[in-house]
Image: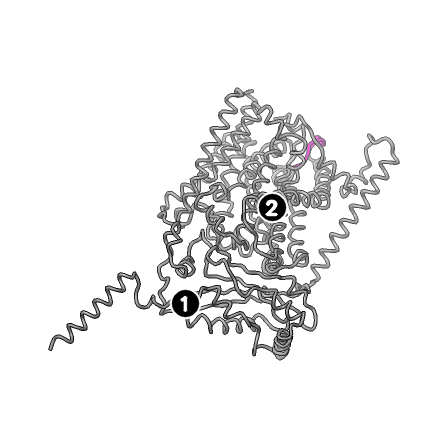
Amino acid sequence: MFYPSLRLLIVLIVAITRVQINGQTSNTQVKPELWVSDLFYRALANFTVRNVGSTACQEQSEMYDRNLRNYTHWAIKMAESWNRHPVGFLSGNTFHMGLYDECIDIRYPVKGQYCLTETKLLLSAENTISHNEVHNRNNIGSYYAWQTLLGWIDYPDQIPRNILNLGICIPDSCSSSDLQKTLQNELDKVFLPEKIKAVVKVDPILCTVKEDKYPYSIAYHITSAIFVVLIFLCCVITIYQYTKISSRHDTTKKINDNDSVLYSFSFIESGKDLFKYDKNNELNLINGCKVLTMVFILLGHRFMYLAGNPMTNAKIVENIYISGPDILLTCMNLVDPFFFMSGYLIYITIIPVFQKSGPIWMKIVSPIIYRVLRILPAYCAVMAITANIVPHLGDGPLWSQNTWKEAEICKKYWWTNVLFISNFIDSKYQCLLMGWYLSCDIQFFIIGVIIVCVYTKNEKYGKSLIGVLIGVSLSLPFIITYMRKIDGILKVDLPFLNNPRSSTVYNQTYRESYSRAIPFVFGLAMGFIVQKLKKSKFKFSQKTVYIGTILVFLVCMCIQLIGAEFYKNERPYYPIEHALYATLSHCTWTTICAWITICHLTTGYGLLSKILTNRLCVILGRLSYSVFLINLPLMQMSQSSQRSPTYFSAKTLLEMWIYDSFKCYLMSFILFMIVEGPFGNLMKYMFGRRKKNISSNTNESPIENVIRIEISKEESSKL
């Protein structure tokens, strides 16, 4: 009587053993018959928007079907403009954008509409083919291909293989929801029987036609009119000044006071400011350092835009997170040298103001107002262009998604930039991605003016105050990182590259001035220290200068590159470790800058100093502020207009970096000549007249711009 039960038990044991030997469970036996590319082709081979949407959509879709069967030219163009058999999933080739221009160029009898769709492949509840993610990514070749596709999805340093961004051409009378509904139905017919769920999303903003759909608002016409008038004004005044100079013969005669304010808008005067050069000015090195820092910032920004946009060979970018170069992963503190230079230059430009007679409140308020007024014209110009002009300047599969959204943010929240508080609001409301820097700089400037004021009134209190600020600036990044349990480094991982505003670290610590104060405070302190060293005529030997520079650079770079360790997915999170790095990472470039400043201003670097203080470096250094403003918008426009995925390589990165650098400096020159230079001259004139009431020294230069700061030879000699 027990034999039937015993026989059943034996059968079950054998069955379980076979499953264990095969390394599978019964419900993992559900495997697709075809590879993902073939499944997509099966669903898309005869795809068009059918039986949904408005009457016009259905009529145009039926017309497309009929003409396609008859091989009519326009219908074939619409059909062949997008890819029905996507390939390269395992290589991370997730964008199949088709031929954007071929689609939207169809004009009659149906207008072509290009839509960039997103399809995410997920497992149905009964399919456990890939419930375990791919862990050994170095031995990926041994995995079942579907497991690689569906299991490689939650790594911040890897592009998900289960997403397809497919460009599809449809009649323009059909909406994005019509396409989404039809595409979802067709994919369900193919993928659901294979126990795979395809989730389709079609963002309306990613459906575009030939015409410029962004509205031409009143703001667009006002912005355009302002720039046209400004350019016309500069041209007319330049011609007027040139005529006056030509007819005067004696060019040494000074122009009258009424003409001086008018000439503020002359290209001749702006050119004089840009191209002037004093080879004996010891602060020329700062311009060289600004240029050197800026070109590497441009390299970092180009890498971010290149790696964060569609590419055909994602594996090369993914390998950077494994084998480097680590400097690309740890360079998000590269703006620290600008904060340092700003702090140092605030001291040496503001201290002469407080050494003169006059109301103390005027000495504090006047430099701050001047600083703000010098920054705002070019800043507002770039915001206005971004909000009102840029959306009309191009097109492409990603153009509307990138430029339109940025324009809407600037239209709604530009005032936070003008008030210099954009670093304290959520980054998704921040107009211009680099706007946080200028907010920090103005906040630092106000603090710096107060510190210099205290120092000139009471040197002991001033030193104590700067000492307290050094301690606070070193402590806050540590405390904030430790208490919030966040990363001590802003990781340049793929989610950040795709959307920097979504990063927790970027929102909570990277932009706040109290987390970025270390280089600024140390720069301010260097002003005190260098002044004392120069008074005592302290000098290093050339051997000490060069060996010390090499050692300081190597030690700081070792600390800097330690941050690459935090990219390892298997590395446990240690709050103390991250908090310590959050502080030390802002000391690396700061220490290098401090050492170079002391060595250059007390001893000099010989030939190296001559290279970094040549005329070209000084001129390009004066353009740094404009370059800083426009480089990200220019790169965004370039990437947003791309028609196909980019092949990522070191050669591509280098070529685009060189091209971007040339384009940014060229456009910054135009911005300087039309906006920054004229309004800067106007501010100098206005504040120069006011300074006559405060001081008899009318030859002293006023306070200069956030990055573009000039010190006259007379002021330098006072130090």
Indicate left or right for 390 with 525 as reference: right
Q: Which residues are magenta?
A: 695-703
Measured in 3D between alpha carbons, the distance from the residue under mark 2 to the one under mark 1, in whole angstroms, is 42 Å
Residue on which the image places disc 2 = 656
Residue 698 colored in magenta in the image: yes
Give how far across and how far down residue 538 sits, in percent: 54, 21
Residue on which the image places disc 1 = 32
Q: Name which of mark 2 and mark 1 comes first in the sequence.
A: 1
Q: Nearer the viewer, residue 350 or 524?
A: 524
Residue at coordinates 60% horizontally, 46% vertically from top-left? Answer: 656
Name the chief secondary structure element in magenta: loop
> Mark 1: which secondary structure?
loop
Indicate left or right for 367 with 262 as reference: left
Residue at coordinates 74% horizontally, 40% vertically from top-left? Answer: 270
Residue 281 colored in magenta in the image: no
Q: Quadrant of the C terminus?
A: top right
